[in-house]
Image (tube, grey):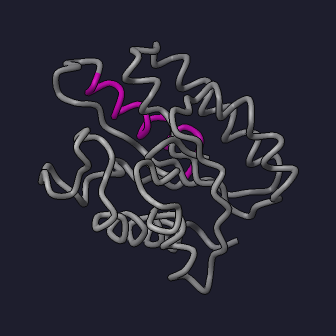
Amino acid sequence: MGDSLSAAYGLRPEQGWVALADAKSARYAFHNASISGETSAGGRSRIDAELARVRPDIVIIELGANDGLRGLPLVQMGANLGWMIGRARRGGAQVLLVGLQLPPNFGRYADDFQRSYLLISQRLGTGLIPHFLAPLGTERKWFQADNLHPVAAAQPMLADQVLAALDALPAR
């Protein structure tokens, strides 16, 4: 469950990290339920249908960037993400929460935004990638012209990061 970062925005679907992780891993089979522009509220409204359709063992939640860019109160984003985590768990799935970071011009809100993923993960006992785009740093070459969405050449690094985080989840 993700937004444009997982929906391969600006790329062919097979170039995105989800498709690359799926092709690379014999251990995990991925179903991409990501939509460009998605918010945590949108994910919350869709998760039950996705859980019923796919019946996953693990749910990766990469949402919140669009909430943050709109200045959504963090309590509301946290409630949406927490609800999704609860629904996934109720369906028998483990959860990997993927944290995001806002541009520094968002000031204290950006700091609190990124910290909220850690707090949610700690409180609800999920796996966590603290900052999804961290492997790319701030190198311009890893980003499309909008300086927000990674280019195709960056996607393997994101796929590797997610696969490592999945492998780190406790065995069930």
- Residue 94: quadrant of the picture: bottom right
Task: Give the dominant element type of the magenta stretch: helix, strand or loop.
Answer: helix
Q: Quadrant of the C terminus?
A: bottom right
Residue 109 location in percent, x, y?
29, 18
Residue 150 magenta-highlighted: no
Left or right? Give the position of 106 relative to 90.
left
Residue 111 colored magenta? yes
* Nearer to the camera, 93 or 157: 157
Residue at image point 36% right, 27% down:
113
Q: Residue 32: where, in percent of width, then height?
A: 63, 57
- Circle count: 0
Q: Residue at x 49, y 70 (%)?
A: 168
**Residue nearest the observer in this picture, 37 or 116:** 37
Q: Position of residue 67 (x, y in %)?
A: 46, 23
Find the magenta span and give its range: 110-126
Left or right: where does residue 9 sit relative to residue 136?
Answer: right
- The x, y position of residue 114, in whole percent, is 34, 34
Which residue appears at 42% of the width and 57% of the height?
Answer: 11
Q: Residue at x 13, y 51 (%)?
A: 140
